Image (cartoon, rainbow, N blue to C red):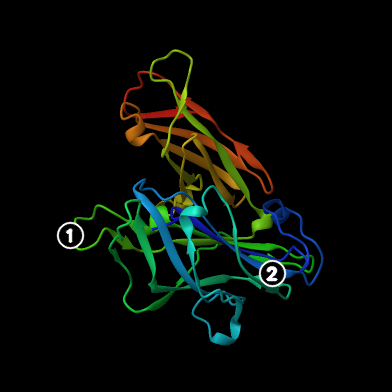
Amino acid sequence: MRRLLPGLLVLSAICGLESGCYEDDLFHPHFAQSPTRVFLTDAPFPVDTVGTVEVYVVEISASTDPDAAAGWESWTRLATPRQRFDLMKLQQSTLALVGEQVLAADVYHSVRVTINTDSSRVIYRDGTEATVSWPSGEQFSVFAYLPAPIVIPETGSSIVVDFDIGRSFATGLGDPLHDFLFTPFVRAVDGARTGSITGTVLRDPDGDGHPEPVQHARITVLSDDSSRANDGSLRVVTGRTDETGYYKVGFLHPATYTIQIDAGAADESFGTLMAYDIEVSAGEDFIFSVTLPAGSVAGVSSWR
């Protein structure tokens, strides 16, 4: 996998050709005819034994036609990197520049990422290569889920393509021939109109008032939109805490979310923590940090 948990491709139309483009620039559009930059990012990979997840990206393109199956004339090629990207290095919403070009002001309804599976691989920390069940064929394309059409105005904007490896690489399916089953889940948003949820997850197992970080705690962001429950799309994106207990789930469309935190092997006595009514606004970080109490009973605890 990569991300991944969540991996990201960002197409940004906000930086001049000669200027540097920093992450904060996604929220400060510049002038018309700015080049569209393509970035790759990812969320933490869910298996701590994995060292490298290299995904070979052939091309990223977008279409102004609401029908993703529309003809070639509706598609605009955004970038053709034709190279591997180590998604494990792109965690906590870190970005990697994939390419850039000037995009015409328009409304984009579809984003497509083409991947070469023969040149993609997952490598464990001990150096051995994992066996992945890839889709048939050397090369295939995946269409991103768009929470809303992506509007590129004359003043410029950005497109973020989030490759969620936490959902894309399934494990433990009882397949003796493969370590992972690759079923890609990708979403795309206007980066200049997104926000993030960030914070730390700590635990105080002794109750002595000296909490310690929870590493590899699973962070799941769920939609509060009940109308999406029937199609199984409540889960928006996944992430993990790092060695300091820090996490960041970025590029979220402005909305109200629920956070689900699972401590996992770090504290098996603690079940699932649910935090409701998390209001994400464009250009802002919603800070949610928590210290898991001592002596918790496995189950679901509701906070907020």
**Label at residue 176:** 1
Q: Which image quarter holds the N terminus? A: bottom left
User: Can residue 204 be seen?
Assistant: yes
In which image quadrant can residue 106 be found?
A: bottom right
In the image, farthest residue toward the front: 127
Residue 232 visible in the current orientation: no
Q: As drawn, which residue projects farthest toward the top? A: 208
Q: CA distance from mark 1 to mark 2?
A: 44 Å
User: Observer-nearest residue: 173 or 67?
Assistant: 173
Task: Residue 26: give x, y in percent of width and height.
Answer: 69, 56
- Amino acid at pointer 1: Pro
Q: Residue at x 74, y 60 (%)?
A: 20
Dot 1 falls on a residue whose secondary structure is loop
Identify the residue position indicated by label 2 in the image. Answer: 36
In-front residue for pair 7/108: 7
Residue 158 is left or right of residue 261, and the answer is right
| Residue 81 to residue 300: above or below | below
The percent coordinates of residue 50 (x first, y second) are 36, 51
Q: Name the mark on residue 209.
A: none
